[in-house]
Image (tube, rainbow, N blue to C red):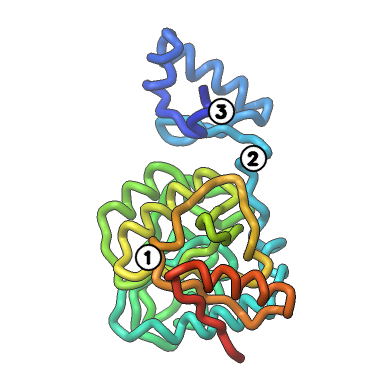
Amino acid sequence: MLSRHSFYQLSDLASNLGVSVSTARRDLDALENEGLVRRTHGGVMLVSDKNHLPFFRDRQNNMADEKNIIGRFAAGVVEDGETIIVDGGTTPYQVAINLQNKNVQIVTNSLPVSNYFADSQSVQVISTGGTLFAGTGVFLGPYAEQMLRGIRAQKAFIGVAGVTESGLYNSNSLVVETEKRMIEAAKEVYIVADSSKFDKIALAYLCSLDNVQAIITAQPSKLAKKKIDSLAKNSRTKILFATQ
């Protein structure tokens, strides 16, 4: 049951199994002790390889130069006074830290972004809240999604694990559900992706390319550029190449 839905409210799970809430809670405690599920307030999440999120520090060093260039370029499209949404990935993080000299409001599910601006006088951060996945620095789940349904922003900056002609992908179904709410809440959506993400498909489908204004990436190698040029030729979505 959890393998199909990833998250369940405790009361719904007990009802579907035909047991009392106390019995379901006791069984879930045993499963959590075995590392198979994670209990949250009022519910439970499945822990499995397919829902594993790479640790933030590990991902931060991957394609770091490209991410830095993309972050500086993407921050340039943000204007003072705007409310923007910043996703929990390492490339959106680079966008956020390049906004430190602007007067903006950032809505984010990223703990590293919130920590970075803890003492800022110009950048106001609003956290989505939700379930914090240890080591990833990302808030996910129904509470984060509910918060995002109630806000509106001028722009959103979203990170992905795969970009193809068929659409955008990420490596975790819970991440995708939160990102869908971000896309719905923003007037303009920008995908920030280093060149390694192109022509790749990941576990969970996010949306079609038509749902975003532009994809911001760095100047790629010749091989990667051929893939990106093919994508640009067959899509109406703009591809913006960040420069130093």
Q: Amino acid at mark 1?
A: Val
Q: Residue at x 59, y 30 (%)?
A: 37
At which x and y percent is residue 125? 38, 69
| Sequence order check, earlier mark of 1 and 2 | 2
The residue to which callout 1 is attached is: 107
Q: CA distance from mark 1 to mark 2?
A: 27 Å
At which x and y percent is residue 99? 45, 82
Where residue 50 is drawn, which disc sits there? Answer: 2
Q: Quadrant of residue 230?
A: bottom right
Neighbourhood count class around disc 3 (C-alpha, 10 Å): few under 14, some 14–19, many 20 upward: few
The front one of 229 and 188 is 229
Location of residue 4 with respect to 241 vertically, above or below: above
| Sequence order check, earlier mark of 1 and 3 | 3
Circle 2 sits in a helix, a strand or a loop, which is it? Answer: helix
Of labels 1 and 2, the one closer to you: 2
Circle 1 sits in a helix, a strand or a loop, which is it? Answer: strand
Neighbourhood count class around disc 2 (C-alpha, 10 Å): few under 14, some 14–19, many 20 upward: few
Q: Residue at x 64, y 61 (%)?
A: 199
Q: Residue at x 56, y 57 (%)?
A: 137
At which x and y percent is residue 14? 42, 16
